[in-house]
């Protein structure tokens, strides 16, 4: 009996154990569906092999994709045998994604083109809702991608080459998950190192490129990995206009270039006025060697001296023009390297005579012509004189002439002074005195005297150009090639009826000037008597000096305002003013949120034009003063010049009614109008809808994270100043627990830095996405501390930081959102900035608060022009993932500034951002597979399937199931004969 | 000796029964969560622009919930019942239908308010005769949840907001221009093949995903 009982007991235990061990974990329904699934997989395989092969790339891609299914189905079989539902689920997730992506290649019979929608039709649609839904879908999509990626890692571990399949199909145009999407997922999980490592490992072994791996390792989904269409849709920017960089005026460029070139030349300290300076110094270093070579070539002393003269002349020519090229690049805003390159290119690129000389002196990259070549080709008995460059001599001569002048400015009248002016004054006095003695009235005598003086200066200028030119060629005063002889030759060449000779006859005896007489400029009494005797009324009109002299003087006087530093850069007051112009424009543009790069180009152009206007205007005024006119006359001449100047518009913009540039409100008003006129507009301002999770990060190029510590900036919003951890640690009074929102850490960081009241106010305002709020308050376990200890009370007495601290952003209001306004006003600049940048506040509200950009949040670096992207924290590097998130959020602020309700000029797709097409696809996919409902038989089917089985006017059963379709009704669902 | 055998027997019994009661506890907790997610009835105050034109022209003046809810099942089933090609030509159709489902659910919630109260009063006693009403509402709510998730919303979103979101999106899609494509036979063949396989894969996937829900429904029967 006992034995029997024992046996029964053990049998019972065995039975129970057996039941426990053998009872399937898989419910019957799943078993049934699995059998259907297997049959359909077999059917798919069979049908697939029967399909006609096609040359169409899409069809080939589809077939290839479907062929991959076998591998996945095989693993499902194994997992089913092991009753591993999780693994089956992972497989099915991968499989259904693959199928969905494959079927996306098949065109629909009807396609909804949403790219161009009549704006009038959009008026009735709440665009904020659309944008919000679109954003929410993106968030959901990232979640789905994360699950898919986890499933793929799991499949790899179980023998399915999920990443390889993905990689192969990617190449065919079927992206189960793109590199960009993988990077997005990695970016949203910066702290999950294992996950990232798993993903990177699988990608590495399945053919990912180096660039892709770097991007994924960094957690940065770069725009370059996105399709072009996506990139162009996702980067709404400030209105772009074609802003070209303005070059300096030709006048300023050439005059300053010449002045800077000539600044390397000088004169010896004697009456000889021999040229000195850089080219002469350089030549003297070559001189001995050249001399020896010439002598060695059989040239005698005299011949050698002639050859050496030629060589010096040509060396200076080559140097001078090469130096002009160099200086013109610098004057044009180029760098020293660019200038050097241009100079060398110029030297290398010369042709003909100058090419040989450049080569001979070893100034070209490759020497093709040597001294020997030159020497072999000249006749020793008749060595030709190498003429100096006429252009160089003209420029040098003018500078030499003008060097006789000085500016005498004790009273601010900038009168021309110097020995020659004393001579002109002496002539004036002599003529006036003689005329008055002759019986001419003082007024009329003064006109004659002034005219005589003017003539003298003109004649002196022309004659001295000749003599100084000859000296610049390297000759002395004496000799047949001397400067004096050159002047005599010039004089002889003048026609008798020329201006100079006619006037000379009025003042002097008809003989050539006596250069040995120091007072030979004093008019001759006899000549004057003859002139006075022949005077007509016409002689009492004022004689205008030659334009050539006056312009040269005007330029020289203008250049005298400028100074050059050791590097040849122009310095002085005018440069400081130009920099002020530039800064004012950049500041104004940044204040209104204009595109930074374009604003900088505009500002640079304005500074260029400011200098041009100053240069041109100053030449005009200085020319008037050089004539001996007053400042009033000079100003009037400038006004007249301004009216017809090619820079008329710039003058109006920069000066307005002022005589000088003033960065006043009038200027900014003119500037705003100018921006508008040229079509330079700020970005459209509507920050993001509650995104929950940020969007894919933007292209940040190759800019690497800065690894060295940065100096903390004292400004509250400076780079490095925002260290959430430290701010949160200081938030000691707060009772509500610090929390985290995984998908939007920027938001949780800023919320953690807030006081209880601020957090309560923010949450009570209802503007933060419920999902994010629930995550932050841990579904109620970390409830916000009520402002007044009970529900329904107001935010309370939040102090305005603006009023009590250094907040630069102005207090503002959002109509209908008093609590949010209070909270926003109570935040510091940095908190307000971070909150807006987190993208958690709906765009229209942000826009209202920031007054369409007029009250823009103060950026981390404290100004409106600094870089928005914070790469570093004080002393440590921001984790790449966080950086990506930060950028996403920041990008959101500008990127989603798509006019709420303002669809003017935008396609619907533009208006809704880049997620529209995906959002639509998301809905379609969800309808067919996501939303599940139960049919009347209790079977779980998709909404579409379930409702397709309902007849028109079908009802819902008491238990929530739906009535099945009547036989045949599915074929004619609307019961309208297929016409509906 | 007999005593010893009975003790062994008892230990075995207790071991297996404790496992069963643990499973029930977990299920009860899940049901609690699902019941909490059902929400409360609150009449919709604002309907989207164009709602009455499409759905309940007769109710436009009164805007009464009573009128609207009576119109909904018929309209909703008709809209959901449309075929694939109709939906391609009328992209707003399914989204409008989802908006209507919100009202449909709300109406069901109201209808079952008392039954739900009675269920809660007896819960978690077994053999709760009001379990089927709770089960029905949970099913509807899960469907509602899935529909909302399809456009990134969740059960925390208010009914009015959800209706507005579905409707706005539908109206937006309606503004597009429908273009007809010629789809070759080759594509068509593959499409049918994929659709058939996708259907069975999706059903299997959904069944696995909703395994726990099935247990809930079974428990509440």
Image (cartoon, helix red, strand yellow):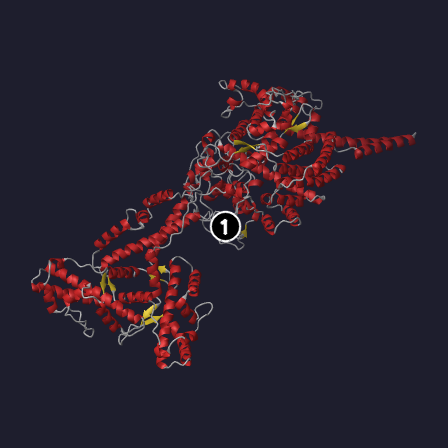
The location of residue A251, given as percent across then percent down, is: 32, 57
Name the residue at 61% across, 28% down.
B84
Q: Is residue A487 left or right of residue A791?
A: left
> Which residue is denoted by mark 1 in the rendering?
A720
Name the residue at 76% across, 31% down.
B18
Quarter of the rendering occupied by the N terminus of chain A: top right
**Relative to residue A249, is residue A932 depicted above or below?**
above
**Relative to residue A652, is residue A620 depicted above or below?**
below
Which of the pair A458/A863 is nearer the observer?
A458
**Relative to residue A827, is residue A636 depicted above or below?**
below
Name the residue at 48% across, 18% down.
B61
Quarter of the rendering occupied by the C terminus of chain A: top right
Question: How many numbered marks, from 0 up?
Answer: 1
* Camera sees residue B53: yes
The location of residue A223, given as percent across then percent down, is: 54, 46
Residue furthest left as drawn: A439
Which of the pair A179/A183 is nearer the observer?
A179
The location of residue A42, given as percent across then percent down, is: 73, 35
Which of the pair A108/A287 is nearer the observer?
A108
């Amino acid at each position: 009996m006992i034995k029997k009982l024992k046996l029964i007991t053990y049998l019972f235990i065995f039975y129970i154990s057996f039941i426990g061990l053998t009872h399937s974990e898989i419910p019957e329904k799943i078993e049934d569906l699995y059998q259907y699934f297997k049959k359909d997989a077999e059917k798919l395989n069979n049908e697939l092999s029967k399909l006609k092969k096609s040359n169409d790339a899409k069809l080939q891609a589809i077939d290839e994709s479907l062929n991959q299914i076998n591998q996945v189905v095989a693993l499902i079989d194994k997992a089913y045998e092991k009753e591993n539902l999780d693994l089956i689920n992972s497989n099915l997730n991968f499989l259904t994604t693959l199928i969905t992506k494959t079927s996306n290649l098949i065109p629909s019979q009807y396609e909804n083109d949403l790219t161009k929608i009549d704006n009038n039709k959009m008026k009735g649609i709440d665009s904020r809702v659309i944008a919000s839904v679109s954003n929410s879908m993106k968030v959901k999509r990232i979640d789905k991608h994360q699950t898919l990626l986890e499933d793929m890692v799991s499949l790899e571990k179980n023998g399915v080459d999920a990443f390889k399949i993905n990689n192969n199909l990617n190449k065919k145009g079927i992206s189960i998950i793109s590199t960009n999407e993988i990077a997005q997922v990695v970016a949203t999980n910066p702290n999950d190192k294992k996950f990232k490592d798993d993903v990177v490992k699988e990608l590495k072994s399945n053919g990912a490129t180096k660039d892709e791996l770097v991007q994924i390792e960094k957690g940065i989904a770069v725009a370059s990995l996105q399709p072009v269409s996506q990139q162009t849709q996702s980067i709404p920017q400030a209105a772009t206009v074609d802003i070209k960089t303005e070059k300096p005026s030709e006048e300023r460029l050439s005059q300053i270039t010449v002045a800077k070139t000539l600044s390397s030349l000088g004169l010896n300290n004697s009456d000889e006025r021999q040229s000195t300076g850089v080219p002469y110094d350089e030549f003297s270093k070559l001189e001995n060697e050249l001399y020896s070579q010439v002598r060695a070539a059989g040239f005698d002393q005299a011949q050698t001296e002639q050859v050496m003269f030629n060589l010096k002349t040509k060396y200076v020519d080559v140097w001078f023009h090469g130096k002009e090229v160099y200086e013109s690049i610098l004057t044009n805003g180029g760098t020293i390297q660019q200038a050097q390159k241009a100079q060398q290119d110029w030297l290398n690129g010369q042709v003909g005579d100058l090419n040989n000389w450049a080569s001979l002196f070893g100034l070209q990259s490759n020497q093709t012509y040597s001294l020997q070549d030159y020497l072999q080709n000249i006749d020793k008995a008749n060595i030709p004189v190498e003429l100096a460059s006429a252009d160089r001599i003209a420029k040098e001569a003018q500078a030499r002439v003008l060097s006789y002048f000085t500016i005498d400015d004790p009273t601010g009248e900038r009168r021309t002074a110097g020995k020659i002016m004393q001579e002109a004054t002496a002539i004036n006095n002599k003529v006036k005195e003689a005329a008055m003695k002759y019986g001419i009235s003082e007024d009329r005598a003064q006109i004659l005297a002034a005219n005589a003086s003017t003539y003298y200066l003109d004649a002196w200028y022309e004659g001295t150009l000749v003599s100084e030119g000859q000296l610049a060629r390297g000759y002395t005063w004496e000799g047949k090639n001397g400067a004096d002889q050159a002047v005599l030759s010039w004089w002889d060449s003048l026609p008798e009826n020329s201006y100079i000779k006619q006037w000379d006859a009025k003042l002097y005896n008809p003989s050539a000037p006596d250069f040995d007489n120091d007072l030979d400029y004093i008019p001759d009494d006899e000549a004057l008597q003859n002139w006075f005797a022949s005077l007509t009324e016409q002689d009492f009109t004022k004689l205008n000096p030659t334009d050539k002299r006056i312009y040269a003087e005007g330029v020289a006087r203008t250049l005298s305002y400028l100074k050059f530093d050791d590097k040849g850069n122009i310095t002085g007051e005018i440069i400081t003013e130009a920099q002020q112009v530039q800064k004012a424009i950049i500041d104004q543009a940044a204040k209104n949120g204009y595109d930074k790069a374009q604003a900088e180009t505009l500002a640079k152009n304005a500074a260029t034009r400011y200098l041009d206007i100053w240069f041109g205007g100053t030449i005009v005024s200085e020319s008037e003063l050089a004539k001996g006119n007053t400042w009033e006359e000079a100003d009037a001449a400038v006004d007249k010049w301004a009216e017809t100047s090619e820079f008329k518009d710039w003058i109006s913009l920069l000066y307005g009614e002022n005589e000088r540039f003033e960065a006043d409100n009038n200027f900014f008003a003119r500037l705003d109008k100018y921006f508008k006129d040229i079509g330079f507009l700020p970005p459209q301002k509507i920050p993001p809808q509650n995104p929950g999770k940020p969007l894919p990060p933007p292209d940040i190029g190759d800019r690497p994270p800065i690894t060295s510590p940065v100096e903390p900036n004292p400004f509250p919003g400076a780079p490095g100043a925002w260290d959430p951890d430290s701010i949160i640690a200081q938030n000691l009074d707060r009772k509500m627990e610090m929390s985290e929102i995984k998908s939007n850490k920027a938001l949780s960081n800023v919320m953690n830095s807030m006081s209880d009241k601020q957090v309560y106010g923010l949450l009570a305002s209802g503007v933060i996405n419920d999902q994010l709020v629930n995550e932050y308050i841990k579904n109620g376990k970390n409830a916000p501390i009520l402002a007044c200890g009970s529900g329904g009370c107001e935010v309370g007495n939040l102090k305005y930081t603006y009023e009590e601290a250094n907040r630069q952003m102005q207090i503002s209001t959002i109509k209908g959102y008093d609590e949010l306004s209070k909270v926003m006003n109570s935040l510091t600049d940095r908190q307000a900035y971070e909150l807006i940048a987190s993208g958690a506040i709906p765009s229209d509200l942000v826009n209202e608060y920031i007054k369409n950009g007029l009250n823009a949040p103060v950026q981390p670096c404290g100004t409106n022009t600094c870089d928005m992207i914070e790469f570093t924290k004080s002393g440590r590097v921001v984790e790449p993932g966080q950086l990506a998130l930060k950028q996403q959020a920041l990008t959101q602020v500008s990127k989603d500034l798509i006019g709420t309700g303002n669809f003017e000029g935008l396609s619907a797709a533009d208006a809704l951002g880049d997620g529209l097409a995906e959002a639509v696809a998301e809905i379609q996919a969800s309808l067919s597979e996501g939303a599940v409902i139960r049919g009347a038989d209790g079977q779980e089917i998709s909404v579409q399937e379930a409702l397709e089985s309902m007849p028109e006017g079908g009802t819902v059963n008491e238990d929530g199931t739906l009535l099945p379709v009547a036989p045949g009704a599915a074929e004619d669902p609307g019961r309208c004969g297929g016409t509906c | 000796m007999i005593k010893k055998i009975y003790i062994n027997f008892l230990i075995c019994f207790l071991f297996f029964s404790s496992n069963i009661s643990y499973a029930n506890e977990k299920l009860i907790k899940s049901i609690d969560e699902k019941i909490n997610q059902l929400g409360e009835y609150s009449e919709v105050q604002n309907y989207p622009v164009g709602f009455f034109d499409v759905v309940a022209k007769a109710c436009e003046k009164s805007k009464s919930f009573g009128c609207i809810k009576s119109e909904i099942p018929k309209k909703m089933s008709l809209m959901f019942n449309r075929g694939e090609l109709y939906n391609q030509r009328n992209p707003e159709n399914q989204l409008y239908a989802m908006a209507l489902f919100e009202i449909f659910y709300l109406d069901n919630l109201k209808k079952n308010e008392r039954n739900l109260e009675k269920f809660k009063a007896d819960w978690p006693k077994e053999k709760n005769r009001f379990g089927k009403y709770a089960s029905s509402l949970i099913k509807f709510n899960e469907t509602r949840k899935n529909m909302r998730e399809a456009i990134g919303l969740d059960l925390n979103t208010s009914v009015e907001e959800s209706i507005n979101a579905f409707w706005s999106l539908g109206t937006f899609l309606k503004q597009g221009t429908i273009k007809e494509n010629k789809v070759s036979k080759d594509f068509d063949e593959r499409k049918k093949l994929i659709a058939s396989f996708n259907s069975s894969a999706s059903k299997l996937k959904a069944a696995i995903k909703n395994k726990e829900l099935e247990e809930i429904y079974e428990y509440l029967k």
